[in-house]
Amino acid sequence: MAGGAVKYRHLSRHSAARQALLRGLVTSLVKHEHIQTTWPKAKEAQRLAEKLITLAKRDNEATRRKAQGILYTPHEILPKLFGELKTRYAERPGGYTRVLRTEPRNAYDQAPSAILELVDGPRDLRFTMTAKAVARGQHEGWAMNDVTQKNVDKVTRYREGGKKALDKLVSQFKWVMGQQQRETEKKIRTDGEKETTHQPWHLPSMAVESEKFLHLSRPIVPATASLQGNIAPLNVNIQPQAILSILDHAVRRDINDTQSTRVIGALVGTRSEDGMEVEVRSCFAIPHTENEDQVEVDVDYQKNMLALTLKASPRESLLGWYTTSHELNSFSALIQNFFAAPDTGTFPHPAVHLTITTDPAAEIETRAYISAPVAVNAERAAESCLFIQVPHKVLYGDAERSALTAIAAAKDTEDRSAPLISDIEGLARSIDQATGLIDRVSEWVGGILDEDEEPNHAIGQYLMNALSLAPKVDPEQMESDFNNHIQDVLMVSYLANTIRNQIDLSQRLATATLNMGEKDGENKAADGEKGGDSRGGRGGKRGGRGGGRGGNHNREPREPREPREPREPTE
């Protein structure tokens, strides 16, 4: 990033953490083209983003490798970087990003904030603000000053179709300003009477005959707190383990008179910061009874299970609910409103309703909905809502695909069981599958070259991006590297076996030493007893006191001696 006399901000991190932070910011910038962070982080990330786009404009094998090392998700972002962004900034000599200072986030976070964005993009703030300033001047009849004219030249100089895009946005702003002015004049004419309803409005390009279409639009003023969480669009991502849990719940359900059509449960997962994207990671079943007249849900069980689930996974939250039927009725609206309520649901975010079919004779079909309130009377407000279908997809990773393949292998057997394959067999199957896919692609490309197949530019672009990520290696070099790798693996295996044998041998030697030590101790003890006996025998043969004490023989009693006469004292 920097070297020599170049100064840069450490951001209170060591080098590796700082580099990881900047890589994450630049990855989000290229993906969303607009991020909000602190001013120091934005200025440092701007350097790396400028370098990344410069690499994309060169577009060769070396720059692709460098860009791939900067981005965290290159398989998703490299096509955009070397496609859309490269074309957008082909004529621009530099200055691909812009940092705009903003107010602090809140009263408790007074760090200097900023917005880092890509210029000439769909979320270019300066382009929008310039168009609004031009529209305000034309609406009020003001002449354009030098500063506004300079900004117009800047934002349209390198933008493709910049003049037309600016004029179109200016006309839209003028129409909105005129609409707001008419609303203000209408309020003044009614002598300050409050207007309780807000009529929906549409841009002129979207105007259609009102008697043939139903328009659901946001009001001019911000929506109330009770409605604001139910009108945001969503993109739903579903993990396979959630689908398997729902199917397991449907198979193990208790079929009786009150529960024979469908099962319900809660969806748990993560939500993005802006609330526009959710990921369903898990779910849990909720007991309920349902008939033609009423539906009953065990609310206490739902609250306890939700608290337990969130305690085990603090980063996850309640997302909505699921059912095993595509039918949408008044009971569905009642349950949807329960999961979207402020005290028991996902408020202020919309609740996601996931439906899935469980018919064994048909393929699994999933649908995702959010809801919006409908203008009905107060008596039917709890059981009325408008279900809006939202895009969704099931995320299959490599691990999930391997697990599903192993499960699907048992469907054709009578006992519904299949053995797990070894790593070598799995590798062989993966290689065979990759070879088959390559053969299909080669056959399709050959048909296009022979003019037997219709060309598809989207598939061609996808294949070109996929091939650009693969390293270009000669077959001989690849074979040499593979053989070297095999030799390394064999050497590691040989060393591991040698170490294992040495450990086994050392354990055996230690055990043998302990056994021999015990036997030597027993022999020494026996020799000691025999030596004592022999020494005692020798002492007995000598006789006297030593023999009596040393031998094992009993001492014979001595005859008593006569007392001696006392001697006379001498002179």
Image: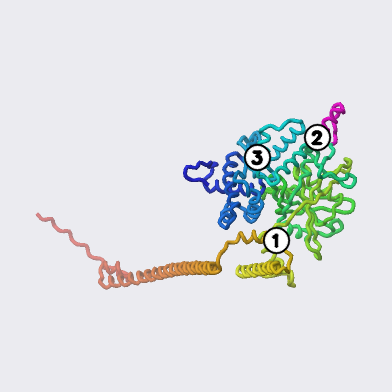
Q: Nearer the viewer, mark 2 or mark 3?
A: 3
* Helix, strand or loop under label 2: helix
Can residue 493 be seen in the rendering of this structure?
no
At 75% from the left edge and 72% from the top edge, which residue is drawn?
A: 414
Image quarter in which the C terminus is found: bottom left
- Circle 3 crowding by C-alpha within 10 Å: few under 14, some 14–19, many from 20: some
The label number, if any, that marks residue 459 in the structure image: 1
- Circle 1 crowding by C-alpha within 10 Å: few under 14, some 14–19, many from 20: few
Q: Amino acid at mark 2?
A: Gly
Q: Amino acid at mark 1?
A: Ile
Q: Position of residue 144 (x, y in %)?
A: 71, 33
Q: Which residue is mark 2?
A: 178
Color style of the picture? rainbow
Region rendered in magenta: 180-197
Q: Is residue 338 above or below residue 553?
A: above
The label number, if any, that marks residue 154 in the structure image: 3
Question: Toward which corner of the image does residue 257 lie, by quadrant?
Answer: bottom right
Q: Earlier in the sequence, mark 2 or mark 3?
A: 3
Q: Earlier in the sequence, mark 3 or mark 1?
A: 3
Distance of mark 3 from mark 1, alpha carbons?
Answer: 37 Å
Q: Position of residue 305 (x, y in %)?
A: 73, 50
Left or right of 533? Residue 234 is right
Q: Is residue 291 above or below residue 476?
A: above
Q: Is residue 65 above or below residue 474?
A: above
* Helix, strand or loop under label 1: helix
